[in-house]
Structures are given as structure tokens and as C-alpha cells.
Image (cartoon, rainbow, N blue to C red):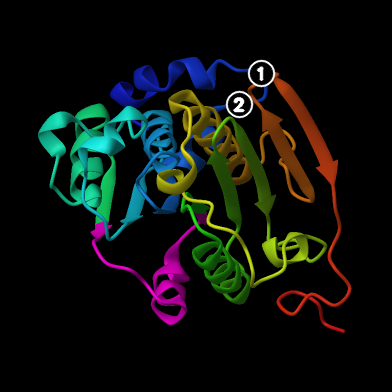
Amino acid sequence: MNDEQLLRYSRQILLPGFDENKQQSLLDAHVLIMGLGGLGSPVAMYLAAAGIGKFTLVDFDHVDLSNLQRQIIHTTHSIKQPKVGSAATAIKNLNPQVITHCINKKLNQSELEQQLKNVTLLIDATDNFTSRFMINRACYNTQTPLVSGAAIRMEGQVSVFDFQNPESPCYRCLYDEGGEENTSCSENGVMAPMVGIIGSIQAMEAIKLITGYGETLTGKLLVTDAMFQDWRTMKFKKAPNCPVCSHQ
């Protein structure tokens, strides 16, 4: 690290047990963010500020006026622009040292697995079960650690699936495919800070995974209900007959 980087990241390096080597791990990391909406916005901004060296940003949508209530990486001037381009501009303004690669299209599983070949971890910031199940399969097949988050109305949840750990369950161990109700914000609504809370936790879990700092939510589901400020952490294990990660 050069002197400018040491100054920029000095408040992290001062943390007990978090040294220059761990900061260098962040600088060397390549994070893929799926979805640059409500969750992806705080994820991208906090990880860029924290010193992640490279991002691949994936989203096929454009910025809409209704997004600005919660998608804080975009601005009024970004309306009608591709979300990945708008996000890349915000990241560059925040931390010019970060490298960004934008994919302005919807990826299928095969295309995603190709992108994951040189990625440190993936953050799932999508808003539907179909994408989450596909991302889970791609990450499991490529052994790419996955940080998954979801937020709707006044509720949210986060979990980590560390596929480099053979004991880690996967997203499919938690939820069955098929028959899910629509869980998008456009159908159900969401309070603006809710996605910020969940996205910030996802960013924190990503930093912990990359640096080995602290204990992650692997094998745990963190659930919050902001209406009553209720927080719960539930442990879960690999499902014996999971069609994705079970070897039985």
C-alpha cells in the first residue's frame, strides 16, 4: 500500500486484529454484485469505501424515479441510465482507485459461472427467488462464497454460504424452489432504510469473509423485523437431500 492508501484506510487498520495485511486482502479482492438496486447500492458504496480493489457489477435495469426512494447509489441525473453505469460513476467518485467492470444484461447460470472464475465472492442483491436459486447453484458449482440478503416491507434477512467450507449449507437448504409468492419491492413496498440496513450487513459479512476477521453468518440466518426492532439469529445445517449441495 502507498501512503495515500494507508491514510484512506487508516481507521480500519487501527482496529484490533485488523492490520495492513487484511486491508491488502480487500485491495486484492474481486467482488461480483448481482443487482444494483436497494441492496446493491449500500453494498457497493461501503465496499468501495472500505477498499475492495475490483468490482463486477451486474444488472440489466435502468434507473427509474421510483428507485430513488431507496437506491442511494443513483441520483436524479441517473434516471433512464443503466444502473451499472450509474453505480460505476458513483463508485469512481467515492474511490477512484477501484476498478469496475459493468455487465448490463441478464446473465444465465452458464454465463454467471464464467464470470465467477476469477471472483473472490458474490453478493446477491437481487429481489426474486428465481435469481437467488440460480445464483446459489452457480456459486456452489464454482465454489464461490455467497453473501445473500433480502428486504421487503419492514423485514429483512442475511445469510452467508461459504462454499469453500464443505460443512456450509446452501440457499436451497433453506428454501424450496417453486410456488414462491412475488417478493419484489414493486409489488409489496419497502421502507427506505430497510434495504440500507440489510445491504450494510451484507457488506460487513463480505469484508469478514475476505479477511477472516470475526465470525461470519455461515450456517446462520439473521432475520430482522424493523417494525418492532426485533433481531433473531437461527442456525441451520445442510439439508440431507438438498438437490444442490447434498452428496447423498
The image position of residue 42, as x and y in percent, is: 41, 33
Tag 1 residue: 16
Q: In the rendered view, does 180 fall on the left or right side of 182? A: right
- Asked if the residue under mark 1 is in contact with the one under mark 2, i.e. CB atoms within 8 Å, the reply is yes
Residue drawn at the location 64% of the way across and 21% of the way down:
227
At label 2, counting other C-alpha atoms closer than 10 Å, the crowd grade (few under 14, some 14-19, many 20 or more) is some
The image position of residue 220, as x and y in percent, is: 78, 45
Residue drawn at the location 60% of the way across and 73% of the way down:
137
Q: Is residue 40 above or below residue 112?
A: above
Distance between the Cα atoms at labels 2 and 1?
A: 6 Å
Tag 2 residue: 18
Residue interval drawn in magenta: 102-122
**Res. 214 image quadrant:** top right
Residue drawn at the location 85% of the way across and 77% of the way down:
241
Dividing the image into 4 quarters, which one contains the C terminus? Answer: bottom right
**Is residue 116 on the magenta stretch?**
yes
Observer-nearest of 60 and 95: 60
**Secondary structure category for the residue under label 1:** loop
The image position of residue 103, as x and y in percent, is: 26, 62
The image position of residue 242, as x and y in percent, is: 79, 75
Residue drawn at the location 51% of the way across and 21% of the way down:
12
**Res. 240 image quadrant:** bottom right
